[in-house]
Amino acid sequence: MIPVAAPTQDELYQDAARTYGAPLERLARAYEADPDIRGDLLQDIHVALWRSFEGFDGRCSTRTWIYRVAHNVGASHIMRQRRTRSEALVGLEELENLPDATTGPQAADRSQALDRLLDLIQRLKPLDRHVILSYLEGLDAASIGEITGLSPGNVATKIHRIKAVLARQFQQGGPDHD
Amino acid sequence: MTNLLNNPQEIWQCQPVEGVKMSAEALRQRSGKFEKRIRRRNVREYVASLLAAVCFGYFLVTTHAVLFRIAYVLFIVGLGWVVYQLHRKGSARSMPAAMGTSTCLQFFRAELERQRDVVKNVWPWYLAPLVPGFVILTAAYMRALPFPAGLASAVWLDGVVAVLFFLVWKMNRRAARRLQRIIDELYAGENSQ
């Protein structure tokens, strides 16, 4: 039997970039609104990913590893930016209890809906942002728990809140409700 | 259309992306640039401290009073210690290696705890090293000037320094408390389920 050579750092990265390139771009968009800074952030995510694969030991899945690295770079970015920007970030609980500041007439098209979604995500604290992004990417609660380190019960509670906030955000008001 | 817009996951996943790709060469270059950025930040810290040290050095060589000279030497040594501590505590860190092995919760909490520890107690590493210089400078003024001008200068100098030190300490304590609140929230959230 011919032993199979373990993939190199470059090969692991190329495979990750090919498979997860689009989610990483979406993730960068959720962490930075300014397109110029976002470009830098996305490149930082790619570099962090490439460098991280040097120490990848297969103890978790490649997907978990990729999302952890990307979210951790995103969280570092938020912490750095918070020193220069003054807007306060909120948790899901606060967002859920806020008066209708985040809601309004229903979005007329896909682009408006996406803008509204991004606006909502960019107001969240890092950990809640990780959870909502993972949810929007279609990951299940167990995977979100593995990436974030939150307990399954905690993830379930947060997803429940996310669904409530999103429902309020996307179903309230609008032409169909007039 | 309404149903489509009511599905945030679909809206999110179907947004247009540019398809950004980085070649191995681009990654290595960018990685090198990142290290350079960190080095530049460190150099900025060193240059700022060096400028201050040069000022004290100038005073040191242009004054002949022994007490003043001792004070300036103490300031230079104190500044050197502060810069060393700033560097050691990682005000400008390179990309952490454990990004993939740490969960988001572990990583975020570790970063917050690191920042909190830096600002929690600035006395031993940021303010105290400059105190000996001020003490000797006070004594030097009192000795160099006749009474009550010497005393007035010393009171004025120490008063301004005391207010500045208090403000620095207070601001850092407030920042530490804010960070601690976030850390506590994270622990509470983790243990609540």
Image (cartoon, coloured by chain):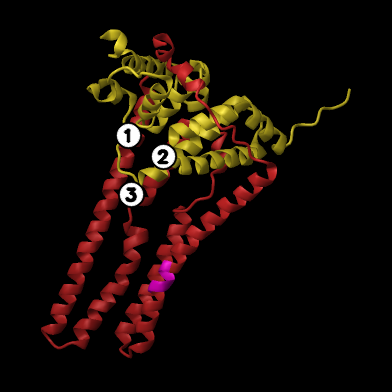
Q: Which residue is mark 2?
A: A78
Q: Chain of mark 2?
A: A
Which circle marks residue B14 in the picture? none
Identify the chain drawn in yellow. A
Q: Is residue B50 magenta?
A: yes
Q: Chain of mark 1?
A: A
Query: Which SS does the magenta portion mostly show?
Result: helix
Q: Given this view, does label 3 or label 2 mark the residue nearer the observer?
A: 2
Indicate the secondary structure of the residue bearing disc 1: loop
Q: Which residue is mark 3?
A: B120
Q: Amino acid at mark 2?
A: Ile
Looking at the rendered image, the quarter that the C terminus of chain A falls into is top left
**What hue represents chain B?**
red
Q: Quick check: can you spot residue A63?
A: yes
Q: Is residue A143 magenta?
A: no
Q: Residues within 10 Å of mark 2 (few under 14, many from 20)?
A: some
Q: Nearer the viewer, residue A94 or B124?
A: A94
Asked whether the residues under marks 3 and 1 belong to the same chain, the reply is no
Q: Amino acid at mark 1?
A: Leu
Whether pointer 3 and pointer 1 mark residues with C-beta atoms closer than 8 Å, the reply is no
Stretch of the chain drawn in magenta = B48-52
User: Rounded to the nearest whole Å, what is the CA distance between mark 1 and mark 2?
Assistant: 10 Å
Residue B69 in percent (x, y) is at: 34, 83
Residue A31 in percent (x, y) is at: 44, 35
User: Rounded to the nearest whole Å, what is the CA distance between mark 3 and mark 1?
Assistant: 22 Å
Q: Residues within 10 Å of mark 3 (few under 14, many from 20)?
A: many
Please report the residue visible at 20 percent of the width from the left and 73 percent of the height from the top.
Answer: B157
Q: Chain of mark 3?
A: B
Residue B135 in percent (x, y) is at: 26, 74
Q: Which residue is mark 1?
A: A89
Residue A153 in percent (x, y) is at: 42, 16
Whether pointer 1 and pointer 2 mark residues with C-beta atoms closer than 8 Å, the reply is yes
